[in-house]
Amino acid sequence: METQVKNETLISKEQLLAHWQGHRALTRRVIEAFPEKELFSFSVGGMRPFAELASELMAIAGPGVKGLATNEWKELDEKDPSKGSKAKLLEFWDKTTAEIDEYWPQIEEGRFQETMLAFGMYEDKGYCTLLYFIDNEIHHRGQGYVYLRALGITPPNFWER
């Protein structure tokens, strides 16, 4: 007996963007919760300070969506663009969000099924690459929650995206 597979979409491209942007809004609130000094200096167990983790997330997210849309992948640049200022870090975070919003509509549906070499070093399907961007953010935000708790600060509710 032959089984026919019906091609159904589990989640739309717009729903996926809204899901990710919900995570990004929550990560932004985690950045806001840090005292200025500790954002750039505090760590636990040898992990990087949260500002460095946020810089990594920005280095991946905006350029990553641009790469998905245009197939132009620059080398990862994880330098902290904030110069030690929480306000500047949040400004760059917001610019990255705007870059995602700009390039997202340009991603053709078929791109998510194509194999690509993201940032010249990560080969996978487009959807796997995108899910890595989101998973990586969740992972690092979890580190931020540990830092905030260690500092005696209650982090934002993780379910409020």
Image (cartoon, rainbow, N blue to C red):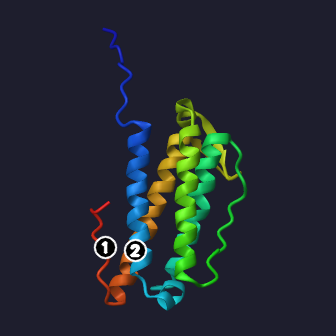
Q: Amino acid at mark 2?
A: Val
Q: Which residue is mark 1?
A: 156
Which residue is at a point 55% across and 41% down the rendered structure image?
126
Q: Position of residue 68 (x, y in %)?
A: 60, 43
Residue 114 locus on image (x, y percent): 59, 34
Please identify the quarter of the rendering in which residue 106 is found: top right
The crowding category of the residue bearing disc 1, from other C-alpha atoms within 10 Å (few below 14, some 14 to 19, many at least 20), is some
The crowding category of the residue bearing disc 2, from other C-alpha atoms within 10 Å (few below 14, some 14 to 19, many at least 20), is: many
Residue type (three-letter) at the residue carrying disc 1: Pro
Residue 156 appears in the rendering: yes
On screen, residue 39 above or below 58: below
Against 56, is 144 above or below? below
Residue occupying the point 67% across, 73% down? 79
The residue closer to the viewer here, 110 or 31, is: 31
Outermost residue, top side = 1
- Label 1 to label 2, Cα distance in Å? 7 Å
Rendering quarter of residue 99: bottom right
Q: Which mark is residue 128?
A: none
Q: Residue at point 52% right, 32% down?
A: 109
Q: Which residue occupies 44% across, 76% down?
A: 31
Instruction: Tell me if 22 is positioned left or right of 128 in this view.
Output: left
Q: Indicate the secondary structure of the residue bearing disc 1.
A: loop
Q: Nearer the viewer, residue 70 or 105?
A: 105
User: Horizontal and vertical percent for residue 60?
Assistant: 59, 59
Labels 1 and 2 touching (C-beta < 8 A): yes
Image location (x, y in percent) of residue 78: 65, 69
Q: What is the number of callouts on the image?
A: 2
Between discs 1 and 2, the one toward the N terminus: 2
- Find numbered disc 2 in the image and state the secondary structure of the residue it sits on: helix
Which quadrant is home to the C terminus? bottom left
Q: What is the quadrant of the N terminus in the image?
A: top left
Tell me the residue that label 2 is attached to. Answer: 30
